[in-house]
Image (tube, rainbow, N blue to C red):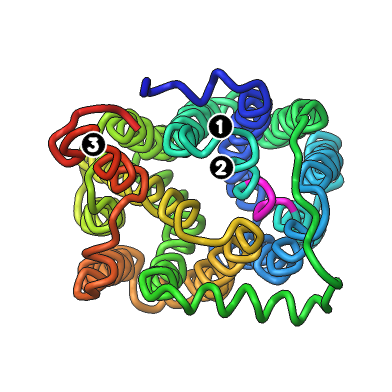
Amino acid sequence: MTTLTALRHRDFRMLVAGTTTSALGNAITPIALAFAVLDLGGSASELGLVVAAFALAEVVTTLFGGVLGDRLPRKVMMEGSAAGSALTQLLIAASLIAGFATIPMIGVIGALNGCLAALSQPSSRAMTRLTVPEADLGSAVAVRALLQTSASTVGFALGGVLVAVVGSGWAIGVDAVTYTIAAICFSRLRVEQAAPEGERSSMLADLGEGAREVFAHTWLWLLIGQALLYHLFYGGAQSVLGPIVVGGEFGRSAWGLAMGTLMAGFVVGGVVCLRWRPRRGLFVGTALLSLTALFPLAMALSDQLWVVLLGAFLHGFGLQIFDVSWDLSIQQNVDPDKLARVYSFDVVGSFVARPAGMALTGPIATVVGFQEWLVVVGCVMGGSALLSLASRDVRHLVRQDLVQSAESGSGDPEASPAAV
């Protein structure tokens, strides 16, 4: 199997064209939004509230997005969300360019944008399985992750440049264009999604069924809990403290460079995932997830930009290898008809505490000290990942494609350098 075999399938190409394009714009917006709030006179606490509004709206809406993604055509969910997001981003861009933007206005529109994104996110992640045959699923997961993070790498670096050269409004306008392109790509998907069998139950019953599927897999609910801690602490460190600490020490373009370097780590990790197929991929990914601690620690403890960039790179590298292993573990071990709901519980469980973390980071860091709080963040991130390895289910979950390969007599999967 070649590393890029999934790209032979037209629907997969349409899917990744849309998700990759929107990933480019979505990497620009957080940088532009942060400096837009600061330019309007916002404090660290106000910036935290703005990004928390987006995150809270996303979390609240995601569970419904998961149920709808298992009930309705996922293509329609993705298409409508992208079109709506294009309009909301265009409104924010116009308000900043024309000079009538206010911090509350940005917060409200950002919350609406979060709702739109949440409605389609479970459908988007579950769509991968509908665009390729089972044999190419591993390749599809790795390729999609690599292309999206490559686009985000460019977007983060471009975001810092655009904000410095043309301003935040025009930078967010680019995101509106990318959402429009994504909507066009999603409209061209030709996928067949089986309709739910039997009599349609209530949304609450569907949610309960999805929750039971999550708790049926110890590795699944345990690592969702780990992700909750990760985002509770890191969300504010990146969205609030990062632009202030790095931007204040090295200049605004340096924060865009740091985000671009983080995404470069994602890209390198994605390339590694194309060729490296560890039998116990979830164990390896979780161990490397502890590298994410190095970014906040570097921001806190070093006055050298190259150290911060190295921490950002290793953060992205470890997180990408974990993400690919995590996504493939879900795709291979969860019932297809519950996939969107499980992804919605993944998102909600992982991000439910993120809005609180964003809102509280500014006040807490102001009292404790920005550098001191970044040290706490790094310790929690690294320690929670390593603690998760105590679970036997995390350590011993085996990739299903390698099991099938071994059973068919194709050789020792652990010794094979073959690509995903």
| Residue 349 to residue 25: above or below | below
Q: Marks 1 and 2, Cα distance to the nearest angstrom?
A: 6 Å
Residue 401 is situated, as x and y percent measured from the top left of the image, at 36, 43
* Disc 2: which residue: 31
Dots 1 and 2: beta carbons under 8 Å? yes
Quarter of the image for the N terminus: give it: top left
- Up the image or down, 164 lies above or below 293; here it is above
Residue to which mark 1 is pinned = 159
Which amino acid, mark 3? Gly
Residue 168 appears left or right of 280: right
- Residue drawn at point x = 25 percent, y = 45 percent: 311
Q: Earlier in the sequence, mark 1 or mark 2?
A: 2
- Residue 303 or residue 200, whichever sits in front: 200
The image quarter in which residue 396 lies: bottom left
Q: Which mark is residue 249?
A: none
Graded by Cα atoms within 10 Å as few (under 14), some (14 to 19) or many (20 or more), the crowding at tag 2 reads many
Q: Amino acid at mark 2?
A: Ile
Left or right: 60 as drawn, with respect to 323: right
First along the sequence among labels 2 and 3: 2
Q: Which residue is tagged 3? A: 409
Left or right of 23 in this view: 374: left
Pick the quarter of the image with the C terminus.
Answer: top left
Q: Label 1: how many residues lie within 10 Å, few (<14), some (14-19) or many (20+)?
A: many
Kind of residue sitting beneath label 1: Gly
**Stretch in magenta:** 120-124
- Residue 73 lies, in percent from the top left, at 81, 48
Residue 146 in the image, given as x and y percentages of width and height: 44, 31
Residue farthest along the left direction in this orientation: 415
